[in-house]
Image (cartoon, rainbow, N blue to C red):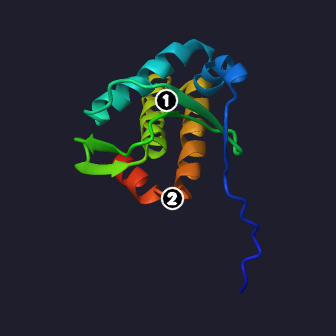
């Protein structure tokens, strides 16, 4: 039997400078946008000892997802104590990891609400994108 399902990969688009202010409420919801930003930055600091701050890029995904990634050209070394992950990855991949952790955290806080359901959807939209990322194995290892 031949599978005739068409597969369309999820693509990422950099949010232009003039639209950055719309990113936080769209990604995290108006009620949690400040907390969402703080969680992503906080998770990056927790996961990467060498992270000392950076300008961040914002991305929208073709499936309705969002993520943030630090604008750093060097690889970043992440340590996830909860699952024994230790490895280096690009800043883009590290940003995906930090954003996934933040979405999971926010969804748990809003569990049982429409907002919580939307955050769970955003987590899965980003994870779907991560599955086709060049560094999918490292991303999945870090979030496992």
Residue drawn at the location 71% of the way across and 86% of the way down: 1
Horizontal and vertical percent for residue 53? Answer: 38, 23
Residue drawn at the location 63% of the way across and 19% of the way down: 25
Horizontally, residue 132 falls left or right of residue 75, namely right
Q: Is residue 144 visible?
A: no
Q: Quadrant of residue 6?
A: bottom right
Which residue bears the numbered disc 2?
134
Which residue bears the numbered disc 1?
107
Horizontal and vertical percent for residue 51? Answer: 32, 30
Q: Quadrant of residue 64?
A: top right
Kind of element beneath mark 1: helix
Kind of element beneath mark 2: loop
Marks 1 and 2 sit apart, C-alpha to C-alpha, by 27 Å
Q: Mark 1 or 2, which is nearer the eye?
A: 2
Q: Quadrant of residue 59?
A: top right
Q: In this rendered view, identify the residue nearer to me: 123 or 92.
A: 92
Above or below residue 26? Residue 68 is below
Horizontally, residue 5 falls left or right of residue 27, namely right
């Amino acid at each position: 039997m031949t599978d005739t399902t068409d597969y369309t990969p999820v693509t990422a688009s950099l949010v232009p400078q003039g639209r950055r202010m719309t990113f936080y409420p769209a990604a995290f919801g108006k009620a949690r946008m400040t907390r969402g930003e703080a969680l992503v930055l906080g998770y990056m600091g927790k996961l990467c000892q060498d992270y000392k701050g950076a300008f961040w890029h914002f991305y929208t995904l073709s499936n309705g997802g969002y993520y943030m990634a630090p604008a750093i050209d060097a690889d970043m070394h992440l340590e996830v104590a909860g699952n024994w992950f230790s490895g280096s990855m690009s800043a883009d991949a590290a940003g995906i990891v930090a954003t996934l952790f933040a979405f999971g955290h926010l969804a748990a806080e809003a569990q049982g609400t429409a907002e919580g359901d939307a955050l769970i959807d955003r987590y899965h939209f980003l994870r779907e994108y991560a599955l086709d990322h060049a560094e999918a194995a490292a991303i999945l290892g870090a979030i496992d």
